[in-house]
Image (spheres, rainbow, N blue to C red):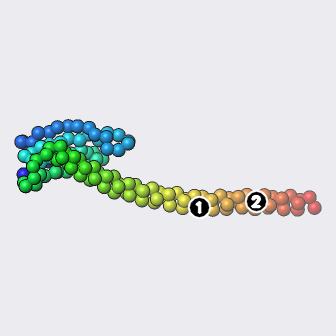
Amino acid sequence: MAAQLICNQPVVGSNPITSSIKLREKGVIKMTYYYHDTDVIATTTYCGKPVRTVAKCNPEDEYDRQFGEALALARLNLKVAKKRRARSYEKMYAAADAHREALDFYYEMRNYNDAAIQEVKDAEAAIKFLMEQVKE
């Protein structure tokens, strides 16, 4: 049975090993492996929250620690990638909403500017009309 992690802390009996791995061009993901019997648990954080995956060895298979680490890492990478995708959708939709609001404000201000320009023209025309009346 796998060691249960609570807030990224292992239960007694698991041996943590921390390593860093470059999974994407922007940087290094720090992760920790925990081992319990024939289970490999990989943990990391994403947006300040713990993310964990488990690779369990089938009792009929021969235990291979390196394969367990690779599988746990691949699953961890997938889990983080899905979280990144979900977060990117949220940010993209928020940006689209902000863009729509900015466009609405822009058109409102453009109409306000057009009205102000027309008021200036009307006021100048009124002054010109009055000045022509005085000359006569």
User: Which amino acid is tagged 1?
Assistant: Tyr
Please tell me which residue lies in front, 110 or 50.
50
Please tell me which residue lies in front, 63 or 121.
63
Residue at (60%, 58%) from the top-left corner? 109
Residue 96 is left or right of residue 125, and the answer is: left
Residue 37, label in figure: none
Residue 76 in picture, x, y percent from top left? 24, 49
Residue 135 in picture, x, y percent from top left? 92, 58
Query: Dividing the picture into quarters, in which one does residue 136 lie?
Result: bottom right
Residue at (22%, 46%) from the top-left corner? 70
Q: Circle 2 sits in a helix, a strand or a loop, which is it? A: helix
| Residue at the far right in the pictured view | 136
Q: Circle 1 sits in a helix, a strand or a loop, which is it? A: helix
Residue at (35%, 40%) from the top-left corner? 27
Residue 43 in picture, x, y percent from top left? 21, 45
User: Which amino acid is tagged 2?
Assistant: Lys
Residue 113 in picture, x, y percent from top left? 65, 58
Query: Dividing the picture into quarters, in which one does residue 59 lie?
Result: bottom left
Give the answer, above or below, for where 133 lies relative to 57. below
Please tell me which residue lies in front, 12 or 121.
12
Q: Which residue is mark 2?
A: 121
Residue 115 is left or right of residue 82, and the answer is: right
Q: Which residue is mark 1?
A: 107
